[in-house]
Image (spheres, grey):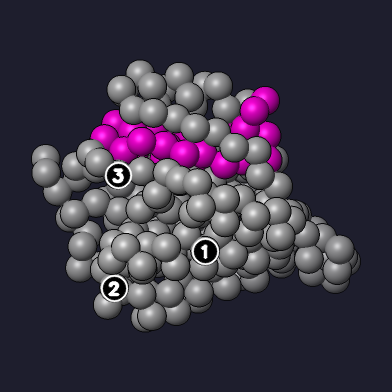
Amino acid sequence: MVSFDLRGRTALVTGANVGIGQAIAIALAEAGADIVAASSSMSKTGAETLRAVEAHGRSFTGHDVDFSDPDAVRGFADRLVAEGPAIDTLVNNAGAIHREPALTHSQEQWQRILDIDLTSQFVLTQVLGGAMVGRGFGRIVSIASMRVFQGGEGVLGYTASKAGLAGITRSFANEWSRHNVTANAVAPGYVATENTRVLQEDQAAYQRIMDRIPIGRWATPEDIAGAVVFLVGPAADYITGVTLPVDGGWLVR
């Protein structure tokens, strides 16, 4: 369907070597986009994503980028703008989580999570989004969390960074939408990935989560990817500044 046709687009997906980011990169390629991927371990673990993208007839370029170092992220973004390819679709998915009670959450871990999950996303969006504004077109989607709406327990730095990511998404939308550059976010619920393995393996916690999800299952990475394809495609041309929950109904229970 033309409303979801991404042919002619070049998308940068961060954290694209596994999990949600990998599913997003593959889904965007299936819709017609060429993929540029960035991850701290892309050269070691990104081959599966490369093969899947190329199986859809799209090009794939991978980059190792340390998202715990915002200066390195800025250097990467500056090189992309200078050398190409021109990025017209940005998916900010790279992220980390640290599980520790608020009472003992160290400042070191707080800063690390904010650097990865928020500051580096701001830097990348500022540089690449600025180029999109100059060209008069761009689509930006950031992967937030349902912690934007709920605090949760034991994930203080993660919650703060994801709430901040939703906030700057609204600010980018306010400033850039008049230039045909939209900015939105997706807030996943519980997704079956390596990041949530500790919860999946805790039978009591797993069951408590299941009992609250009206759809009756955890999300797959592909569930999140579908929302991203929608938000960056022509069907969502009049949507900006939104944080879209993709949570199986968790927030309405």
CB of mark 2 within 8 Å of CB of mark 3?
no
Instruction: Give the distance between the C-alpha atoms of the residues marked 3 and 1, in whole angstroms.
Output: 18 Å
Residue 13 % position (x, y): 48, 45
Mark-to-mark CA distance, 2 and 3 = 18 Å
User: CB of mark 3 within 8 Å of CB of mark 1?
Assistant: no
Q: Secondary structure at mark 1?
A: helix
For the point 30% across and 56% down, the residue is: 231
Q: Which residues are magenta?
A: 17-44
**116 or 159, which lies in front?**
116
Say what secondary structure mark 3 lies in: loop
Circle 3 packing at 10 Å, graded few (<14), some (14-19), many (20+), is many
Q: Is residue 53 left or right of residue 193?
A: left
C-alpha distance separating marks 2 and 1: 15 Å
Numbered tag placed on residue 179 in the rendering: 2
Please state if 57 lies on the left or on the right of 52 as rendered.
left
Decide which of 64, 209 is in the foreground and name it.
64
Image location of residue 98, percent across then percent down: 75, 54
| Disc number placed over residue 127 in the picture, else none | 1
Element type where label 2 sits in the image: helix
The kind of residue tagged 1 is Val
Of all residues, the one furthest to the left in this rendering is: 1
In primary-sequence order, the first of circles 2 and 1 is: 1
Mark 2: amino acid:
His
Residue 45 appears in the figure: yes
Instruction: Give yes or no for residue 36 being in the magenta stretch.
Output: yes
Sequence-first tag of 2 and 3: 3
State the residue position of label 3: 9
Residue sitting at 57 percent across and 73 percent down? 164
Residue 121 at x, y percent in the picture: 57, 61
